[in-house]
Amino acid sequence: MESAHPARGAFDRMTALFWRRPKLLTALLIAPPLLWLGVVYVGSLAALLLQSFYSIDEFSGIVVPEFTLKTYAELLIPSNYDVIVRTVTMAAAVTLASVAIAFPVAFFAARHAKGRWKAVFYLGVMLPLWSSYLVKVYAWKLILAKEGIITWAAEGIGAGNVLGAVLAIPVIGGNSLSTSYIGTFLVFVYVWLPYMILPMQASLERVPTSMLEASADLGARGWRTFRSVILPLALPGVIAGSIFTFSLTLGDYIIPQIIGSSRFFIGQAVYSLQGTAGNIPLAAAFAVVPIVIMLVYLAVARKMGAFDAL
Amino acid sequence: MTAAVEFLNVSRHFGTVRAVDRVDLSIAEGSFFAMLGPSGSGKTTCLRLISGFEKPTAGTIRIFGEDMGEVPPNRRHVNTVFQDYALFPHMNVRDNVAYGLMVRGVDRRSRRDKAEEMLSLVKLDGFGDRKPAQLSGGQRQRVALARALVNEPRVLLLDEPLGALDLKLREAMQDELKALQRRLGITFVFVTHDQGEALSMADRVAVFNEGRIAQVGTPSEVYDRPATRFVADFVGSSNVLPPDLTRSFGGPECWASLRPEAIRFAPAAEARATGRVSALRYLGSGTRVALEAGGQEIAVLVPAGNPLPAVGDRAGLTWDSDALHLMEGA
């Protein structure tokens, strides 16, 4: 009697080939994404980095393809530097606010919501992501406008002067919410919040209940357990979420254009520099700023032990 | 003397499930107490009622005479060794052990000294700087022990303390836990589904079944004189005889327990009963012979080195007359 079935066609022979050479299958599977990441993605990043070391000829407006740090020096001109400070401050504020708002939501979803409520949670968090970003931003413009529902509601409950006082705060205030930094901030927080909640919820879900019980068992009150056990264990999720909120805010050029004072953010600066101004090197240098900030941020987070619990 | 832990008619219901059903229990101070039962029998819930992670639906729990009704877990003089150890993965071993002291605001230096002392108590000197992930299962369990003992609890609770360890380590830890309890002199309450573990470590054993305590007693009481059919079967897999079989085996008409190791093979003339051998199971230290007698399976434990019958043989059985334990209340 035969001890093996004969091969039945090409697929059988292919299966046999992959069985004999398992690395061949891995190579075939990994090649397309590797090409995409390596060439298209990392390649364009390298091109970007290269461009940022070029400069523009002030008279002809032509890019001079020679290595120089002149373009980076231009970032330190007050008008450019302001753009960076403004953007980083906004990104940090948006991230902190997202952490503060997302944590209770994520905590509830991870530790208390079961079955149907969990589904409701996911739907509630994901639903805003299904509608167009532009639609949401314009909707917020209407909500925040001087004639919008917030002003109307504030006046209706007799809090019109409170709103007036908030808008009278220098720098972050303005003529109306939709033309102030407060408005920009609110819309950023709204739009990026799901990206903070989801990773946070995933990391909180991985903290076993017995660990919280152990903390209480050893005498800890709620706040101590939160600080010494929950927060450190959830930190990888918080960092993951903050990478989203921070870097998305750093790079966004549509929200500050539609809502807020018309002062530039990094994204808008890049957009206008590579467009009408044709200053590709400076646009590239601006684009490198968020990348460097994120690298520094991750290095600091790592140093502080944010990934120890991974 | 006040009991270390006392349950007065305690129930804990989850919806319609009665996890713990009208339990009365008293655990003496300084004893090594086992809660034994199959999964879902309510033993773990009882442990969590003592630690405070569950609140009774009805009844009163006292610890050293004090009603625990309104006392949260962090204020009870009770500490727990969790089944999965629940060590904090982001802290090193020393910080894990010192956690209870940090919470109470003990200064860093005393914390360190005390943690090292506890680590040496559980024979883990020099492991303070490691992370829990770098330890073996047995070492992690010792850390969990040290962490629970650092607050000097009056009652130590252990939830399936040896469940995750392999056999050899389990046996060594049994002796060690027992020695530790004697040395510290505090009350240990542990939950287990392993009857061997309960019998070998505990001073007293409570056998749980379906949310109720079937029997409380010393290990030998529970083993030799089981109060119910359940206890007889669960602790040491005894032969549980229905009333008619007890009678044909020479007893009165009531349920009885007959330990497999109490039965011997005998010539037909001297036999108290006969049966047909249906299966043999080799155990190393002996062989478990299953026989068909009076319409029921009877197990006989034959120590190694004795002659064995073959499957299908008819065999006579005998036992000492006091081996037949009657269970009137069953």
Image (tube, coloured by chain):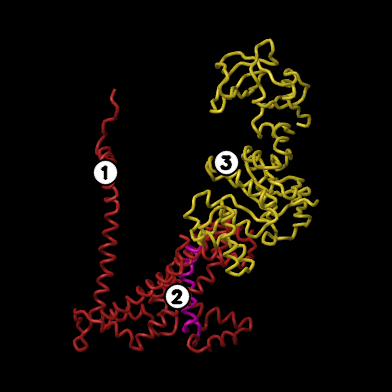
Chain colours: A red, B yellow
Quadrant holding the C terminus of chain A: bottom left
Q: Is residue A66 above or below residue B26?
A: below
Parent chain of label 1: A
Label 1: element kind: loop
Q: Residues within 10 Å of mark 2 (few under 14, many from 20)?
A: some
In front: label 3 or label 2:
3
Which label sits on residue B171?
A: 3
Which label sits on residue A138?
A: 2
Quadrant holding the N terminus of chain A: top left
Residue A4 image-quadrant placement: top left
Residue B76 image-quadrant placement: bottom right
Q: Residues within 10 Å of mark 3 (few under 14, many from 20)?
A: some
Same chain for the residues at labels 1 and 3, yes or no? no
Residue under the point 19% across and 78% down: A65
In the picture provided, is B148 more to the left or to the right than A51? right
Q: Mainly helix, strand or loop, the magenta region?
A: helix
The residue closer to the viewer here, B300 or B22, is B300
In the picture provided, is B101 more to the left or to the right than B139? right
Name the residue type under label 2: Tyr
Label 3: element kind: helix
The residue that label 1 is drawn on is: A21
Q: Residues within 10 Å of mark 1 (few under 14, many from 20)?
A: few
The residue closer to the viewer here, A126 or B221, is B221
Residue B196: within the magenta?
no
Say how many tags the image has: 3
Label 2: element kind: helix
Q: Which residues are magenta?
A: A175-200
Measure the alpha-carbon separation of dots 1 and 2: 56 Å
Measure the alpha-carbon separation of dots 1 and 3: 46 Å
Q: Is residue A52 above or below residue B199?
A: below
Q: Are marks 1 and 3 in contact (CB under 8 Å)?
A: no
